[in-house]
Image: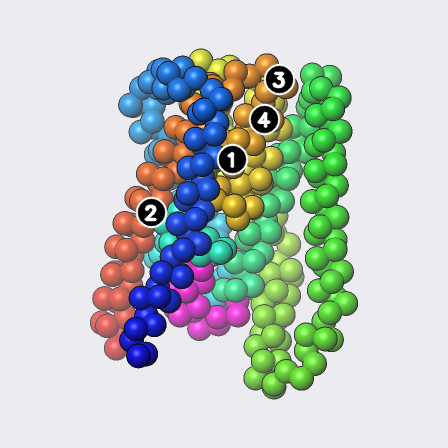
Amino acid sequence: MIGAHHPQQGSRRWLPIVLRWVAGAAVLAVMLHFLPLATVRAAMAQIPAWLFVAVLLGYLFAHTLGIAKWRMVVNAAGAELDFATSAQCYLGGLFGTLFLPSIVGGDVIRLAVGLRRSPRPAAVLAGNAVDRFLDVTAQTGLVLLGIGLLPGSMPENLQESARKALLVFVAGVVVLVAMTILLHRMLLGGRSIRFRRRLARLRHALRSVSRQPHVLLLGWLAGTFIQATFLILTARLAVSCGLTLRLRIWLFAWPLAKLAAILPLTQGGIGVREAALVALLAPFGAASHLVLAAGLVWEGVIIAGGLISGGIAMLFGRRNARRSVTRT
């Protein structure tokens, strides 16, 4: 009787990811229904194979810097992870974002490996949260830069919408922080001493990072460079498709589209990112089918990069396992 529940539990665990893949396919299907499929396919065919490979290599290179950034932040919190373990965590997270059932995507993989390998698990948890915060602030900074460079060419209604979206985002962060402070005592009430000790370790790890402002600054600069690299690579694909826009327009639209993809509606933001990019670039005269074509090819880069990252993470995992056996 107990064993009979395992298939049902497994199916329930995989149901959310299947539904998100279906949702992403549905969004793309709706877009292709309203846009000429033949023109989208023709635009994608204009991208040579060598360019796709070059963009994929650039994507992986940027994530190599991402590994170093993530390791720097979590070690500033006291995680004491070497590069091989950090690479296993980070690259496994890239794979998990696309292909494993998880509400928070690849963070589950990063934490699952990091918490097991680090002598201070709370530092891994705190450092990963800070790293995510730095990524979001980097994307927000690019949006603000784009808005600052587009006061004359941006339609007034789009300017107002962008301001409202940023205000909602900032207000959401403020409300989240305020609720955390107000509910602090309630969350601690009735908790065991063991839980309080774990929370104290987490708080100590967060303070360790905050006491190193140079780490936060370097992490933010690295995150901004990584996101800007992805933006430029996407714009390069768009040029090959026949879409040429000023870089400041991409600075405005691309980070907003990626922020929209954070919503847990589809797996890895597939479909949501492309739909948001089409909507954001349309007021600037960008042909929707060209934007979609470039977005689909970029999605192919992300999926290919996720597969390669998963394979490399597996190799690092085996290497780390052999090292652990040798030490024991």
Instruction: Give the residue at mark 1.
Output: 273
Q: CA distance from mark 4 to mark 2?
A: 31 Å
| Marking on residue 284 | 3
Query: Magenta residues?
Result: 108-123
Q: Rounded to the nearest whole Å, what is the CA distance between mark 4 and mark 3?
A: 10 Å
Is residue 3 left or right of 142 when viewed as pictured?
Answer: left
* Discs 4/2, front: 4
Amino acid type indicated by mark 3 = Phe
**Above or below — where is 49 with respect to 111?**
above
Residue sitting at x 41%, y 34%: 299
Tag 1 and tag 4, C-beta contact below 8 Å: no
In front: label 2 or label 3: 3
Disc 2 or disc 1, which is closer to the eye?
A: 1
Queried whether the magenta region covers residue 134, the answer comes back as no
Distance (Cα) linking label 2 and label 3 = 35 Å
Measuring 39% from the left and 47% from the top, which residue is drawn there? 98
Q: Please report whichever mark, 4 or 3, sits nearer to the chain's N-terminal start.
A: 4
Q: Which mark is residue 279?
A: 4
Mark 2: secondary structure: helix
Please give the name of the residue rendered at 73% of the width and 75% of the height, measured from the top-left corner.
185
